[in-house]
Amino acid sequence: MWEYFKIFSNPKKFRERGLLGMNARNYYVISKHNKRSLYPLVDDKVQTKKLANGININTPRMIGVVEHQFEVKNLPQIVAGRSEFVIKPAHGSQGKGVLVIKNYADNVFTTASGKKLGFNEVYQHVSNILSGLYSLGGQYDVALIEELVHFSDAFQEYSYQGIPDVRLIIYKGFPIMSMMRLATKESDGRANLHQGAVGVGLGMRDGKAVRAVSHNMPIAIHPDTGVDLMTLKVPFWREHLLIGSQAYEMTGLGYMGADIVLDKERGPMMLELNARPGLAIQIANGKGLKEAIKRVDKFYPKNLNAEERVDYVLNNAE
Amino acid sequence: MKKMFSVRGVLTLFLIATTLFALWATYYKISVWGFSFKPKKEADVWTIDAHISFMPTGDPIEVSLSTPNIGDEYKLLSEDVVAKGYEVEKDEKNHRIKMLSKARKYQQDVYYRIMIYDNEDVSGKVKEPAPQKVKKPTFDDELQEGMVHEIWALADAKGKGSDAQHIIELLNEKTPAREVDAFLPVKKTQQVMAEKIIYLLATRGISARIVRGVKLSEKKHAAPADLMLEVHEGSKWMVYNLETGAAGLPKNFVIFQRGGVSLLDVAGGVDSQVKFSVVKSVISSFKMAGRRAKYEKSRLFDYTIYNLPSLEQNTLKWLMIFPLGILLVVILRNVVGIQTMGTFTPMLISMSFVKTGFMAGFICFSAIVALGLLIRAALTRLNLLLVPRISAVVIWVIVIMQLLTVFGYQSDLKIIASAAFFPIIITAWIIERASITWEEEGAKNATRQIVNTLIVAVLTYVVICNDYIRHIMFAFNEWNLVILALVMLLGTYTGYRLSELKRFAPLVGEK
């Protein structure tokens, strides 16, 4: 009986490591630093995209938007001439409702996992998006169609299908923690840790892997490709951090998550922002967020611009 | 956080204030209205009628009756005098009630009526100031003195018990000893026996007195007062049964008068007597509280939920249990960290369990969800839009409930017949969301969410189905304010959740 309780850790050890719990995140961090009225800026991916493009942050190019049910049948016109694209809900979260079309030819849509879909199935998917099935509060949504990202060859070995992305936690404009999320066979091409994706904690100064986890437990190699995860190093690291840092001025959110993908030709691109980023990044890094937040509050200089903040992090981060 | 008026500080003050208020209100309800923690729906109420009758002599009449000092044993519900044309005076200090009238002609009948109900057990030991030392009776002649000595010798030969018990036993023997026979008169009324025992005890310097009262039993009609003996032992008055010698005041004995004072005095009348009748009735405990409140002239009661018609009371009784369920949900989500489908869905399911009974509800709910998921899977193929699709699921759920209820009735399975109690819309949403989770995140995640939801529902059920808890939350509904304060205070809980202690365990290097 007593053995059973050993799966729970002593909360004192957590406090020593500066781990941020869900309650503390909501109470001290999110509700203090994120104004509710700013949420729509990041909850609506179409808005985020427009804001980002306004200050020259790269994002996947938008192909079109389906806002109303009667427009669904226009889908062939919208994607005419393209063989690959992504359909996603503008208000989705955790990659829910994202449909990646790798090949569209002769009225057949082939998804990332190789499944072949007909028009009816894709229409159904778009209809579901519009009726709010994947949106946060279940409210009516719009479907966003954008270009497919061709992720950099640097990550070829590290991900099983799917698109690997870098998640940055931005506090008061400083990137304070980061991880790379790698899809696995189990996660079905998705980059969500709770669905079985691999999380690789990255050093803030250099973007090099420091630790990797799968299902919360440390691992050394990718379960599907067998590559040594500790050899991972994200190229264009400064550019990654800069996108995250700029998102602070762009949205005014004091605490957020920024998802960044590295495109072969276009470099790092902002995929989406999140006003309530999850806590799993702490496990991937083996470090607590509370600790990092405290350090920013205590020691980091104020009134820096985005470039200066990134330089400060590159030189001073732990 | 170190501000003078931190949110947590204010909420803590609120919690303390509500707790103090709840404690006071609980005390008030128990002591004044006679509420109890036990979910006893009904209480025994005894109506004691003292019927006083006498012939007027032609002088002004003054009737004085000793009234019971209703202490801890019983609670007084009402007190009435039925005496037409009499002026009634109450003497609280000496526990007497007086009925005054000008001279009258014919036989007079006046009634004093009290309604009391059981409060709690008493030990039968009554603390009262000790009486003065009893003067040893003087003996008429040598013969009597000798007789007393012989009787005491016989009494002392008895084994266990006090002197009083020995004497009572001796005098009540079926075939009395020769000495006792000679001592007692032929006609042995309770009154005579009591006087003789008191006389015998006095010879040893033990003071004793008669206690007059009414033994509560359902078959008492126009009976004289019942007698008991009170003997002064140590610093207390001990009550003894005059026939068996059993010590202690019986639970169902209401004392009207004790000691030297008279039970009934009638000036201006002769042949006076008082007869007692007892009627037992059963009354709902909340109705009784209302009568008590009226007796205490407490208007407060009129503005409580207990003064409402029973239909409204039952509805409120149902509502009063919600806050506790909500508190449990808050704790399970924010302190334990269980993820469920919808915040209050588990509570609504458990509410249905209360109506259907646990096993029936559990089996039935599982059956509905399982069948619903099958139908939902079929609907997926039809490519319907979301709102019409969820609406179709709702109607399907109604159809399933109908079929289960009819089938359950026909096959005499009570378990299945309870299908109709589940909230349809909630059930339909559970099916819809489970189905989406199934497609999106796999069967494992969907099952886990349903299981989590059911676990929370069962835990909530265990709390709210308890008769005691339901009674307490209704009778002492002020505690809902404390729950409110607790829930708000939990809103500032920033510690780790139990689930996080497990989730982040690999981080602190434990196995």
Image (cartoon, helix red, strand yellow):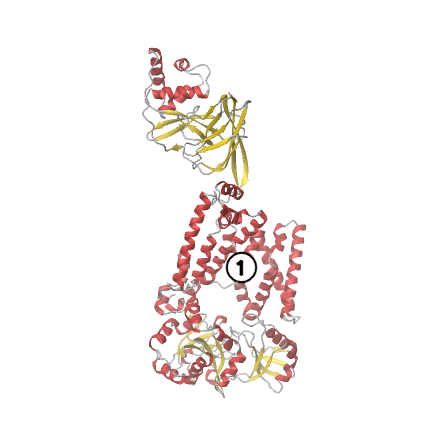
Q: Quadrant of the C terminus of chain B?
A: bottom left
Which residue is disc 1 drawn over?
Answer: B346
Looking at the image, is B356 positioned above or below residue B433?
above
Residue A161, given in percent of the width and then of the height, sits at 52, 79
Q: How many marks?
A: 1
Is residue A191 placed above or below B60 in the rendered structure?
Answer: below
Q: Position of residue A6 (x, y in %)?
A: 39, 61
Label 1 Cα crowd, 10 Å radius (few <14 / some 14-19 / many 20+):
many
Can I make out residue B446 in this image?
A: yes
Q: From where the camera sits, is residue B172 visible?
A: no
Callout 1 amino acid: Pro
Q: Residue B506: x percent and y percent?
A: 40, 68
Where B87 sits versus B351, above or below? above
Task: Name the spot of residue B172 as percent of width and height, x first.
Answer: 43, 20
Residue at coordinates 34% horizontally, 13% vertically from top-left? B146
Q: Residue at x 58, y 78 (%)?
A: A143
Quarter of the image where the N terminus of chain B is located: bottom left
Residue placed most toward the observer, B301 or B411: B301
Q: Secondary structure at mark 1?
A: helix
Chain holding disc 1: B
Taking depth in this image into account, of A5 and A258 the one nearest to the observer is: A258
- Residue A61 falls left or right of residue A245: right
